[in-house]
Every structure is written in C-alpha cells, then in structure tokens.
Image: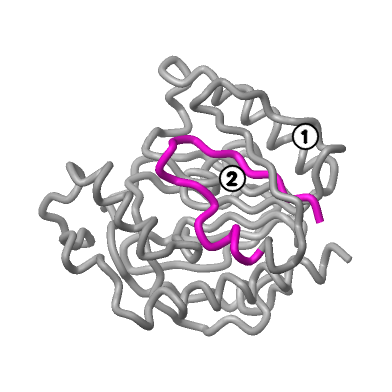
Amino acid sequence: MRLHYFQHVAFEDLAEIGSWARAQGATIRATRLYAGETPPIPGEFDWLVIMGGPMNIYEEDRYPWLKTEKAAIAAAVAAGKVVVGVCLGAQLIADVLGGPVTRNLHKEIGWFPVELTPQGHEMAAFRGLPARFTAFHWHGDTFAIPPGAVHAALSAGCRNQAFVYHDRVVGLQFHLESSAQSIKKLIDNCGDELVAGTYIQGAAQMLPAPDRVPEINGIMAQLLNNLAGLAD
C-alpha cells in the first residue's frame, strides 16, 4: 500500500492514521501544501488522506494552493483511489464532488457523540462500527452531502458528519485519528477559538480520559480496515 497525505499546517499531521498505516507495512509520503510542495499524480499512490486545518476551503485568495489541491483530489477520485478526508479534508472532498461548504450553525469543538444514519450503518466502509460513539471535533464549517454520496453520520451540533461516495471515498467531519499529543497541538495553536458556545468545550475538558483516545483509534482502524478490504 502506498499512502499519500495532504497536510495543511505543521501541527496537523496523520496522527494515529500513521500508526495504522505503518502497521500495514504501507509506504507513507506527504505533500505539505503550506510549504509549497506539489501534489503527486494518482499513479504515485493507492490511498489519499486529506487532513484538517484552520483555513476554509473557499479561501483560495489567501491560500492559492487550495485550487491545486482540489484538482489533485478530483483526479484521485476519478482514478478510483481510496480517498479519506478528515475535517477540512472532508469539506474539500465535498466541494470537489459538488457539495457546498458553508458556515455551520454552531462551532463544534470538543468531545461530542456521533450517530450513524441508517444508510451509513449499511455502508461497507462503516461495517462493525458502533451505531453511536463519542468523537473529537474541531470545526466551524459544514459540508452538504455531495450528489451521489450517502449521508453516513450526524451529531446534535452538526447534521452532516460523514459521507461515503462510490464506496471508496469517505469524508469525516469529526476526528478519529487524534492522539493526546495532536489534541494538545490544536489547543496550543487554535486556542483562541475556545469561546463560550453550545458545542465548545474548554481546554481542560478536551484533554482526553485515558480510554478515550484508544476507543476512537479503534473505530478508525475498523473503518480503515474496511476500506482496505474494499480496495483489494
């Protein structure tokens, strides 16, 4: 397996997706878009993982590489690659597939429950996942479900939490890859967003209980294993 990922800021990398990929014996390479690196062509990878970031998908004037990134995502989808987007990454995929990205009614930052939709529960990518689980969140925007995609998960604070397109393309608004270290990095770098809000927790609430990170990482591993099986 050749896994490639797009990174938008220095403090949001693969986190525990990297641990899963290394356990599969995967070759891992990255395009650090914030550093001016150029995305590869689809023939150079099998999986594309698109990570999060504090920018918005429509800020192309401020981040001109977003246009190049969107074209690379579209090419990967067209080539039939496994494509997984997390948070901003999911929004970028949605935008590429025709699902508009807009400001959500609430910012959602912290640990909040996610529930699979009946359709999501039937998707092969989500096989074996619990019907309801607590995930980590850090977002202010939301995506519309793209045409031809399945609405796979929701939460009280954000209706569109996940989608699946043509079985191999998955967008997750929430984070399953987080580690205690990656959460701490987000708090350190984006702590100005921690203001009063219905779905915004304080820094102390977000530092995870000992069992919480292994729980979400286990759910993530199940999802990625499912996608690996579909790709065989």
Classify 10 Å Cα crowding around label 1: few (below 14), some (14-19), many (20 and above): some
Q: Residue at x 37, y 38 (%)?
A: 54
Q: Secondary structure at mark 1?
A: helix
Q: Residue at x 50, y 63 (%)?
A: 177
Classify 10 Å Cα crowding around label 2: few (below 14), some (14-19), many (20 and above): many
Q: Residue at x 58, y 60 (%)?
A: 17
User: Residue 61, percent across and down?
Assistant: 44, 15
Q: Secondary structure at mark 2?
A: strand
Q: Quadrant of residue 5?
A: top right
Q: Residue at x 45, y 61 (%)?
A: 175
- Give the quarter of the figure containing the C terminus: bottom right
Mark sitting earlier along the chain (2/1)? 2
Amino acid type assigned to the residue bearing label 1 in the image: Ala
User: Label 2, label 1: how many angstroms apart (C-alpha)?
Assistant: 14 Å
- Is 125 placed above or below 89 here? below
Relative to 148, is 78 on the left or the right?
Answer: right
Q: Nearer the viewer, mark 2 or mark 1?
A: 2
Judge by depth and name the residue closer to the eye, 112 or 10: 10
Q: Which residues are magenta?
A: 1-20
User: Residue 142, percent across and down?
Assistant: 42, 48
Judge by depth and name the residue closer to the eye, 221 or 64: 221
Relative to 215, is 23 on the left or the right?
Answer: right
Residue 17 falls inside the magenta stretch? yes
User: Residue 209, percent across and down?
Assistant: 29, 78
Residue at the far left: name it. 196
Q: Residue under label 1, please give it.
A: 75
Q: Residue under label 2, please give it.
A: 50
Amino acid type assigned to the residue bearing label 2 in the image: Ile
Relative to 215, is 231 on the left or the right?
Answer: right
- Give the quarter of the figure containing the N terminus: bottom right
